Amino acid sequence: MQRIKSFFFKTTGRAMFVALALFVVLYGVLSTAIVRQLEDERFIYRENFVWAVFQVQRQFLVVQRDIEAAFGRVGVEDGVVDDILLEYEILVSRVILLREGEGFKVLFTVPEVAETIEALEARIDEIDTTLAAITAPEEKLTELYRLLEPLSDALQQAVVRTTNFVSVYNANNISVVKTDIQMLSYLFFIGVIVMAVLGGFMIRQRQKIFAADIAAQKARQEQEVIEEAADYAKMHALGTLAGGVAHEINTPAQYIQNNLEFLSDSFADLVGAIDRTNPKEPAKLNLDNDKIDFISEEVPMAIDESIQGLNRIAEIVRGIRKFAHPTTDAVELISITEEIDTAVTLTRNQVKHIADLEVSMQSDVTEVSGRRNHLSQALINLIVNASQAIRESGQRRGNIDLLVMSDEDNVYIRLRDNGGGVPAELRERIFDYFFTTKERGVGTGQGLPICRKLIQDDFNGDLTLSADYTDGAEFVIRLPKPDANAMADTNAEFLEGPSDLNSLLR
């Protein structure tokens, strides 16, 4: 039922959003069309019609007046003729502008205006032809005046008819504009209502997004707290193991020191036994055969032991460095054997006096996808818990088994111990934060829950306690297998050489 409600809510919300979006688009288109209609060329140029015709008439009268003034003088100068012809050219240009101007086309629907402009254009062509054949200035002015004179009354009538036309035209335009403005007002109010509905819908959606962001932020904060707790748990585990690790380093360091002292003494004996009494002869070694045999046998052994001790120390340091190295957020292929190596190395001293730790690889899958160091952190915690359980059970020496298995989908790391096990009444609580059965200062109650959270979040797996294991306790780490293609090369490389896990247990 909840899925059906969610489906209808999402469908209705989407349909409503699409309908409102279409209405907004339609409103925008209609509003734009009305605004463009208000800006129509008829409305824009309605006041220019009378002005345009009047300018033609005005220039026409200027030409006539200048010609009449020129005839009233004694003699007509060339400069005066040129000025009059220039005024005539201005008249021609204004006629052309009126004819070809984009905003004056409506004006030619008035018959008197159209006929007058056509007659004026024809007369201009005639004037141009006539003036081209005349060379005398006075004669040019005479012909120009004669040809223009008949059009004076027609231009006057064109101005009058244009004035009447503009009055009617403006009245019609005002009526249309009024209707358009009313329609635009209606659309505006409807648009306000629609935008309010859309705004409410968007606010509701925004609230949902905000709630989702809050939830995501809370999840991130929880993850940060878990990561900080994991880092603390890692450092706490490293601090707990510090004494044992120091002892593990001290033992090989001690016999390296002893071997170096022996090598120093042997070298001093060899140097002291060299005889250089005769400078012309080679030096002689005055040393008993038994001493030579002893040095020959013991020095190589001391050197080999020292090299093994240094390798042992380097191995422990590598384990500490891997474990303490800051974990990145990147998910990558993690080597199971390396994580187990690190865990076994760092817990060896704490375990070796309590139990025998056996590692068994029963799977050809050697890598899983996750974040580095978190698997070894979980294993260290489980191994330490197992050793403490065996010690608390009172056994002289126990057993800890670490088995790696796999099926079609997952890799399983099973860690078993033969300690006292987990009481039935505590099985449901061992993964609760801050729950512990250990003494104050020994347990923090965060180890198992943090390890489980790391396995779940960083490997998409799980950490569980087996319910059917009766010889102690068995914790199972389930890790999903990575993509088969990504595993092909890494598995082939791993199978070429034997694992060195057994060497870690010596």
Image (cartoon, rainbow, N blue to C red):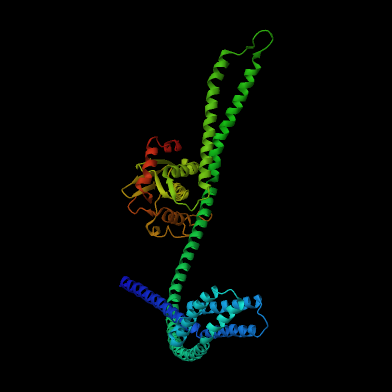
Q: In this image, 262 relative to 122: left or right?
A: right
Q: Position of residue 142 (x, y in %)?
A: 58, 81
Against 500, residue 394 (above or below) is: below
Q: Position of residue 203 (x, y in %)?
A: 45, 76
Q: Quadrant of the N terminus?
A: bottom left
Q: Quadrant of the C terminus?
A: top left
Against 342, residue 441 (above or below) is: below
Q: Position of residue 356 (x, y in %)?
A: 42, 40
Whether residue 388 appears in this view of the structure is yes
Q: Nearer the viewer, residue 453 or 31?
A: 31
Q: Nearer the viewer, residue 364 or 24?
A: 24
State how many labels appear.
Answer: 0
Residue depicted at 37% across the width and 37% down the height? 495
Q: Nearer the viewer, residue 467 or 195?
A: 195
Q: Position of residue 58 (x, y in %)?
A: 57, 85
Q: Nearer the viewer, residue 16 or 65?
A: 65
Q: In this image, 312 relative to 398: left or right?
A: right
Q: Quadrant of residue 54?
A: bottom right
Q: Quadrant of residue 6?
A: bottom left
Against 476, residue 114 (above or below) is: below
Residue depicted at 32% across the width and 52% down the height? 468
